Image: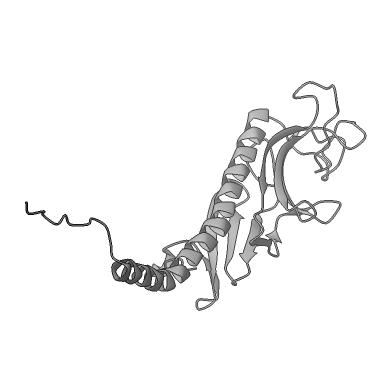
Amino acid sequence: MVRKCRRQDGFTFIEVLVVLVLLMVLMVFAFPAIQGMVRRGKIEGTARQTSVLVQSARLAALKAGGQKATAPLGGTSWSSRAVVRLDPATRELVAFVDVNDAAGNPGSDLLFNPVAGEKRGDTDTLLGRVALPNHVLIDTSDGLTTGSDGVPVAVFLSDGSIDRSGAFRFRDRNGNRLEVRIEPRATARVELRKWDAGANAWLANGQRGKQWSF
């Protein structure tokens, strides 16, 4: 009786070794691109989340409706205002409707200090938070209002305008810089821009024919 030899399925050691070498070569070339995507995702994601937070604050201010500022910031004649704070101590942006000061008195002090037990609308109300990833750093702000503690804040009035136009800025450890710009004052339009060293200017993606690169 003649026995037929069965072919052994599977890969030989040499074949497996060749595949591993090819994978390693691909990883060497792909790793910088993957790193760039991760960096871009973190800083651009933070900027876009900030943009959404700013827009939600403006909408909250518009809902107040019909209120006019008749005193400097922090004055007791101020009624509710929508505020976005970039706090370096907690590394986060906080958006809230500012109704009272730290003592619970009516007025805008640009700080989030809700009074326990008070119903929504009678005390500071949280609109949202954005925590900064470790890779994203706070850059110098431009314009905007400065809180009593030196923190930059975007203050939206009930007609949808902003107290002072300007930008929240972020950077990463690779020198990339993005800003969330809010201007002009009257309409408080929000735009994302990246610092272009070659053009020596902050540019929106595609502006002047320049695409963002990270």
Name the residue located 55 percent from the left edge and 52 percent from the top edge.
45
Q: Nearer the viewer, residue 163 or 195?
A: 195
Q: Nearer the viewer, residue 141 or 91?
A: 91
Look at the picture and state if 125 lies above or below 71. above
In the image, farthest residue toward the front: 1
Q: Is residue 42 visible?
A: yes
Q: Quadrant of residue 94?
A: top right
Q: Quadrant of residue 161?
A: top right
Q: Nearer the viewer, residue 110 or 34?
A: 34
* Colour mode of the rendering: one colour
Residue 82 location (% of width, % of height): 71, 38
Name the residue located 43 percent from the left edge and 73 percent from the top edge.
28
Left or right of 200 on screen, residue 134 = right
Look at the picture and state if 149 lies above or below 73. below
Q: Nearer the viewer, residue 199 or 1?
A: 1
Q: Quadrant of residue 14?
A: bottom left
Q: Is residue 65 visible?
A: no
Left or right of 142 on screen, residue 17 = left
How many marks the image carries: the answer is: 0
Residue 5 location (% of width, % of height): 14, 57
Left or right of 71 on screen, residue 125 = left
Residue 163 location (% of width, % of height): 71, 48
